[in-house]
Image (cartoon, grey):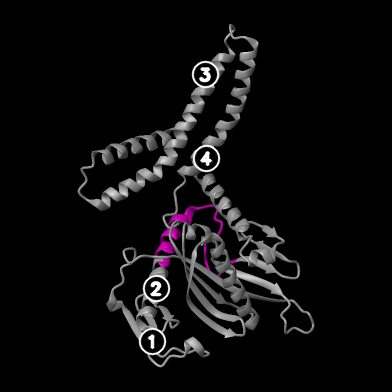
Amino acid sequence: MSLAAKLDKVLIRYHELRDILAASEMSDPREFGRLSKEFSDMTPVVEAIEATKKAEAELADLATMLTDKDLDADMKEMAKLEYETLKDKIPDMEYQIKVLLLPKDADDERNAILEVRAGTGGEEAGLFAADLFRMYQRYAANQGWKFEILTLSESGLGALKEASASISGKGVFSRLKFESGVHRVQRVPETEASGRIHTSAATVAVLPEAEEVDIQIDEKDLQIDVYRASGAGGQHVNTTDSAVRITHVPSGIVVTQQDERSQHKNRAKAMKVLRARLYEEERRRTESERSANRKSQVGSGDRSERIRTYNFPQGRVTDHRVNLTLYKIDLILEGECLDEIIDVLGAEDQAAKLAEASEE
């Protein structure tokens, strides 16, 4: 389908929605809400189309002026300048329309569940996992997002076995969705007397947070165990069976939660994570079907895919999917320059989708 045909289709649907919503005779509030959202989402596209059509009409008028023999030299020169400016501007306007027409990821505006786990590399992997978890915590703070720790399993002084958090705010998943995968670190451990560089890794998973309406979980499919929380003391000491382990029998997914003193709160947090994991399984299955014929992808989001290397001796961070290297390792781990990587990943994904759309 040509771009012009696509634009005509968008305009027809937009005016159709406008008439339906203006009638206000819909008895189903959910359907009214769905159509209102569709209308709202289409508005920026329609505004861009109308602005482009207006610019094209102005360009045609200026072209006519330039062929007018009765037009004085000064007016013709002004018309020529306007013509050239508008002629250069229209391709950019058309490109923006193509971007706006790209199918949106329905989960982009969702909150996210972040999971970080130490991988290969022993204690050094645990220390790196802690570095990554702090990096995302600081990045969330810089974005004005809420970062709520769900689980925190420590393996030593400053090291983590695994940790998870709920991150809420505007566009959280759209910004973090390409962070899933294996993050590798190269540095000299403090305990290494010979100064030899060690390589270790941690895995990151970013899951769109699911609501109860998104994932229906049958209580009969759950095996729920309660036990006494363990820990190094302080707030973790508990004399009641407040820790919760939930096993979703059909999928085999197991979620444990023990950071809260209340069994009820631990169960609620565990269910939030379970819903996110089940939703992600369904999302991955759907995406796998859609992307079977896809020629280009920034990253599959697979936790086994090595996506980034943090090299401390050279002070660099390299994202292997887009072949981007930044010599700002300290600022990135502070969460201050992570946007520079995220922006490139988003632009690359957008470019890949545009290339595919042009082939259709």
Q: Position of residue 78 (x, y in %)?
A: 62, 19
Q: Position of residue 357 (x, y in %)?
A: 49, 44
Name the residue that disc number 1 marks: 242
Name the residue that disc number 4 marks: 96
SS assignment at label 1:
loop
- The residue depicted at 59 percent of the width and 7 percent of the height is 69
Q: Which residue occupies the foreground of this view, 110 or 204?
A: 110
Q: What amino acid is labelled 3 in the image?
A: Asp
Dot 3 or dot 4, earlier in sequence? 3
Disc number for residue 274 = 2
Dot 4 or dot 2, earlier in sequence? 4
Name the residue that disc number 3 marks: 61
Q: Which mark is nearer the camera, 3 or 2?
A: 3
Q: What amino acid is labelled 2 in the image?
A: Leu
Q: What amino acid is labelled 1 in the image?
A: Ser
Q: Is residue 282 visible?
A: yes
- The residue depicted at 35 percent of the width and 48 percent of the height is 37
Q: Position of residue 20 (x, y in %)?
A: 26, 40
